Image (cartoon, helix red, strand yellow):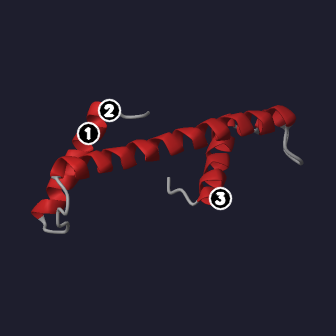
Amino acid sequence: MRPSPAQIERVADELLRRLLARQLLDAPAAEATIRGRFAALLRANFDQEAEIEREAQAEAGKIVRQGAPGVRREDLDLRRVEQLVKQRIAKARGFAL
């Protein structure tokens, strides 16, 4: 489930606050700019994951409808097939799930 824009903003704010508190980040720009960049990166990450999930659902549905060699169609679990397809797509794209 995708987090709301407010949740993404809170995560970005907390990330920035913790990095600054531990002095792991020198703020070369205004904090609002950095917070906005963190939020944009988080949104992009969730968008990529949603796209991978859509592709995995479509491909898994096709696999289950067509059947897999050596496996009876009724033995195929759609959720498990989706999960495996999603992992394969993410790995091919270099995306960490």
Residue 72, horizontal then vertical, whole percent: 85, 39
Instruction: In the rendered view, tell whether residue 30 sits above or below residue 21.
Output: above
Question: What amino acid is found at the position of numbered circle 3 in the picture?
Answer: Ala
Q: Residue furthest front?
A: 29
Q: Is residue 9 left or right of residue 20?
A: right
Q: Is residue 33 left or right of residue 50?
A: left
Residue 7, horizontal then vertical, whole percent: 28, 35
In the image, which is nearer the foreground, mark 1 or mark 3? 1
| Residue 96 or residue 20, whichever sits in front | 20
Asked whether the beta carbons under mark 2 and mark 1 sit within 8 Å of each other, the answer is yes
Question: What amino acid is found at the position of numbered circle 2 in the picture?
Answer: Pro
Quadrant assignment, res 6: top left
Q: Which residue is mark 2?
A: 5
Q: Which residue is mark 3?
A: 92
Q: Secondary structure at mark 1?
A: helix
Q: CA distance from mark 2 to mark 1?
A: 6 Å
Q: Which residue is mark 1?
A: 9
State the residue at coordinates (79%, 39%): 63
Pointer 1 or 3: first along the chain: 1
Q: Is residue 83 left or right of residue 21?
A: right
Residue 54, horizontal then vertical, whole percent: 62, 35
Label 1 neighbour load within 10 Å: few <14, some 14-19, many 20+: some
